Image (cartoon, rainbow, N blue to C red):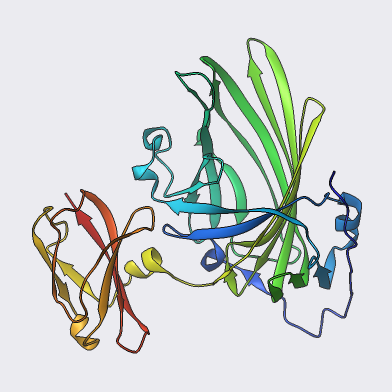
Amino acid sequence: MKRSLPLFVLGLSSSLVAQPTITSLNMPLVGDVVSVALCSDAVDANALNASAGAMQTWDFSGLSVNANEQFNFVDPAGTLWANDYPGSDLCGISWDGSHSYYASSASALDTEGNAFIIPGTPPEDTAKVILSADMERMLELPYTYGASHSDAFSGLFSVLGFNATVDGTIDLEADGYGTLVLATGTYANVVRYHFNRVQNNTILGQTTTSTKEQWGWVSADHRFWLLLMEINSTTGVTDEVVWFNTDPTLAGPSNVADAAAAPIGIYPNPAEVGSAITLVGAQRAPGAQAVLFDASGRVARTFRPGIMQLPTDGLQAGAYVLRLTAANGEPAGNARVTLR
């Protein structure tokens, strides 16, 4: 049975500290692997809603951890359902195998849909929600305390050989900011949002409605969520989810984000599998270590320090990111690499 935890709230004058702002630099990126702790604690909506406002201290250091899992963020092009989600540039894969497809930009994080395999006796079936024509706007960016938005979405839903329509709404408000205390540490410059989401699935003339109420804590100093709590309800069945990030990554560009303005270059690019690629501009970091990551963020190959021509024999065709690290351990640059 889940237990409720006390929520300690401290209100201070909002004029003492500038309000933090959440931007695209705080959103997940291709190659991110996020470790989270799943918790057994109950979600106390009344206590959470009472903790809104400026300069809060949310103390969740006593959350009860049930399991440790991961989110993996990958290039949608390499996933099973890439053709169903042409507008996405990011796919988040959760520990249960579900895939969520996102269109990310400096101004928003939109959801194009999600897909997962229904386990059972083969042949296995897939459940998919596709919102390509009318995506769901999950977050408008940048946002800070007091920001809000509403969005309507619609699309198609398929499961067990049946096709249906889906529509719904999301209403979100950034309802608090302050400091978040977790078992892993204390995090300042945190903005909390609270949203209510309704989704209607209509199949063979029958409509079922599911609701989601979610609270999410995001730090202006880190990438991805620090803490998430939600209450899901479908036809009277309620499910609660609580997890927190156990090793938050600092905000800012990473392997793929850096590549757009990389201080190094690759020639030729695209390159044929099996040919050598040459680093251009790497001489500014003599002795740098080069590591090649595939689209899922895994290390595909590590090259000896100082090498300028990198062999690609044995690699698969696809998109990669090359990361350089200087001899002193400092980042020395990144670049996108395409093998064909």
Count of numbered circles in the view: 0
Residue farthest to the left, as pictured:
275
Q: Residue at x 67, y 11 (%)?
A: 205
- 177 above or below 204? below
Q: Residue at x 58, y 68 (%)?
A: 247
Towards the viewer: 157 or 235: 235
Towards the viewer: 120 or 216: 120
Residue 335 in picture, x, y percent from top left: 28, 68
- 312 above or below 129? below
Q: Residue at x 59, y 22 (%)?
A: 165
Which quadrant does the N terminus fall into?
top right
State which quadrant residue 136 falls in.
top right
Position of residue 18 in the picture relative to residue 78 (left or right): right
- 74 above or below 278? above
Determine if residue 119 is in view.
Answer: yes
Position of residue 313 in the picture relative to residue 151 (left or right): left
Determine if residue 134 is in view.
Answer: no
Position of residue 51 in the picture relative to residue 187 (left or right): right
Q: Residue at x 51, y 14 (%)?
A: 161
Residue 55 in picture, x, y percent from top left: 82, 75
Towards the viewer: 83 or 303: 303
Residue 141 in picture, x, y percent from top left: 59, 61
Position of residue 156 in the picture relative to residue 189 (left or right): left
Residue 299 in picture, x, y percent from top left: 33, 61
